[in-house]
Image (cartoon, helix red, strand yellow):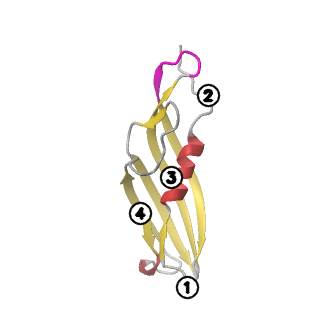
Amino acid sequence: MKIDANQLVDGKTEIFTGVQGADGLDLEVSGTRLSAPIDINAEVTKIHDTLDINVSLKTDALMQCSRCLSELNVSIRRNFRLDYHLSEADSMIVDITEDVRQEIILGYPLKPLCCS
């Protein structure tokens, strides 16, 4: 998800929503793959030369149970905050895709277990 800071009004919160596929995000690890697109909601506030971004995301992943090795669907929900310092030398377009990728991976359970 890319956010153009030039389009933001200083001090005003804007809401960005989007759906991102897992393609190209390198989210598959052994026994885990996304089974649904990633729903991303971002509340962005520009304060002088800083972007304050509150992000909530949700998706589902198919994982392998650590106990019985059966496949199970795990819901991943993450809420996090990002701060970007803007300088005139940098591009005014902020790409939060890598931060979203890292948060999804951090949301993977260490030992997914099914109910049985």
> Whole-Å distance between the Cαs marked 2 and 1?
44 Å
Q: Earlier in the sequence, mark 1 or mark 4?
A: 4
* Neighbourhood count class around disc 4 (C-alpha, 10 Å): few under 14, some 14–19, many 20 upward: some
Magenta span contains residue 62? no
Q: Identify the image quadrant of residue 87.
A: bottom right
In this view, the residue in front, 5 or 71, is 71
Circle 1 residues within 10 Å: few <14, some 14–19, many ≥20 = few
Disc 1: which residue: 89
For marks 3 and 1, the one nearer the N-term is 3
Amino acid type indicated by mark 4:
Phe
Q: CA distance from mark 2 to mark 4?
A: 33 Å
Tell me where residue 84 appears, x and y as whole percent. 59, 71
Q: Is residue 67 magenta?
A: yes
Q: Nearer the viewer, mark 2 or mark 3?
A: 2
Marking on residue 56:
3
Secondary structure under tag 4 reads strand
Q: Residue placed at 61% from the left, 28% from the top?
A: 111
Q: Earlier in the sequence, mark 2 or mark 3?
A: 3
Gap in angstroms between the C-alphas marked 2 and 3: 23 Å
Looking at the image, is mark 2 or mark 4 nearer the viewer?
A: 2
Measured from the top left, where is residue 92 in percent x and y? 48, 78
